[in-house]
Amino acid sequence: MNFKRIFGLFLRHFFLIKSSLPRILDLIYWPTIQIILWGFISKFFSIHSDYYNNTVGVILTCAILYDFLFRSSISFNMLFLEEIWSRNFTNLFIAPMKISEIITSLIITALIRTLIGLVPAILITSPLFGISILNLGVPLFYLFLSLYIFGITLGLFVSSGLLRYGPAFENIAWSSLFLLAPLGCIYYPIEILPQFFQTIARGLPLVYIFEEARSILVNKEVNYSNIVEALYLNGIYLFLGISLFYYSFSQARKKGSLINIGE
Amino acid sequence: MKTLIIVENLSKNYSKKEAVKNINFKINENEILGLLGPNGCGKTTTIAMMLGLLKPTSGKVLINGEDIDKNRISLLHKMNFISPYIELPKKLSVKENLIVYGHLYGVKKVKSRIEYLTEKLRLKEFLNKQTGELSSGQKNRVSLAKALINDPSILFLDEPTASLDPETGNYVRSFIEKISKEKNMSILLASHNMDEVKRLCKNVLMMKDGEIIDKGAPNELIKKHGKTNLEEVFLKLNKVDDEF
């Protein structure tokens, strides 16, 4: 892998963001609104629910974690969609960039893009609601890591579709996470789901991540088996995502979608 | 003269449609080869296969003896492409776009390369302007600067002067002529501007329905078909009826 090329693709998106105040505000606006909304809901439940009694911030913490996942995935997809919208796709693929370099660059850029949006939103939770996500302690790092890997993996799945089917696949990019959210058991334990959906949900790393977050905040217990399970599943999905991206690139070369993808 | 590109029995089928049918040609070092044909005749498909963007159904493209399909990344370092159908990011300034592509092509001294190209292509005054704010002629020159950022030995030019005014068009043609000689560059030029092709190209390929239907030096083709210019040859070969 060549660092200069990875940096070059990062620069393409960095220049785009830094020169546009509306883009920066757009990155910050949605996570902030989302977290303020969930902050008030969280406050209400912490007062009126037995389950969440005296455990201020469980819902808000889960909302922040989910938003991190959402932003990671959307950021990855957006980077890819930007190339399609700007009709720059062909230029990118005639540059001597390996697929692994494109993926690496998008992973790094998506993380920075996500953090630009989420850090200010996280910072306001403390003065506004008296809650700090840092209460999760050391496992917070693993939870974020797991969510980020899963967000990127979803981004890879959607980008594979964009690569193969073009902009027609764009709507899937926006809806993919909404589809998984009910099964991810973000705000409720898995037992709430009907048996059939529980089986499907157990195949997703999200269940273990949010289960762990609740376990730490509600029961004050760290269960590393949840973290290991989530990372294990993430490894499998990431491998599938990368393989699918390579396969879609190969199919796009056969079908000619790299030439007319902006159309 | 050394042969740089060999296109061997190249075909591309899209489901039932045969876009390119078993074409063969060579491009020598320091040669500008013209590729002529009506829209949809397979020119873009041929260029896409030569750039490794499209996988051939059969046949191969050898660049310096290496198959583009097998050594895509290493060969792309030596090549570049300009087409009016692809654009550079509009929200990035000219300078930012060239910095990005300088990095993507692994150019060693990006800054001095940008200075050289913007000087040569009269782009200095637009360096900090957003690419999307430029006129189509200025954008075209920026695309040309991007296409030359890696100092390629092979250049694919698809309608390089399509949207330029006559004076700038002439300047770009002279620039292409000069730089191809200076850098020993091989160029495949797809164009509908017959005067441009006649001026720049040593040899010309005439394509129709995915096939090469004739080839030769522009003057030889004019003589062979008993016409007075290349446009008439083009119209004859494509049987374009000029009566309405």
Image: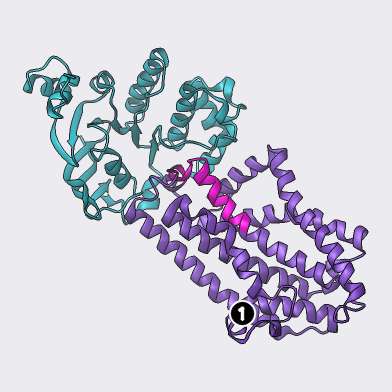
Chain colours: A purple, B cyan
Give residue A147's position: percent from left, percent from top: 67, 69
Query: Which residue lies under the disc numbered 1?
Result: A201
In the image, residue B154 sits, relative to residue A1, either above or below, namely above
B127 relative to A212 in the view: left or right: left
Specify the principal SS of the magenta part: helix
- B133, above or below A15, in the image: above
* Magenta span contains residue A75: yes
The residue at the far top in this view is: B167
Horizontal arrangement in the rendering, residue B43 relative to residue A71 (left or right): left
**Residue at point 55%, 70% (across, down):** A238
Where residue B163 sits: x, y (%)? 41, 23
Residue displayed at 58% across by 60% down: A175
Residue ID at (50%, 36%): B88
Q: Amino acid at mark 1?
A: Ala
Q: Give the residue displayed 51% in from the left and 64% down from the top.
A: A157
Report if residue A1 is visible in the image. Answer: no
Front residue of A127 and A33? A33
Residue A145 on image: x %, y %:
68, 69
Q: Which residues are magenta?
A: A74-92
Which image quarter is the N terminus of chain B in?
top left
Which image quarter: residue B20?
top left
Q: Is residue B148 above or below residue A194?
A: above
Judged from the image, the secondary structure of the residue bearing numbered disc 1 is: helix
Q: Is residue B156 left or right of residue B24?
A: right
**Closer-to-camera residue (A248/A33):** A33
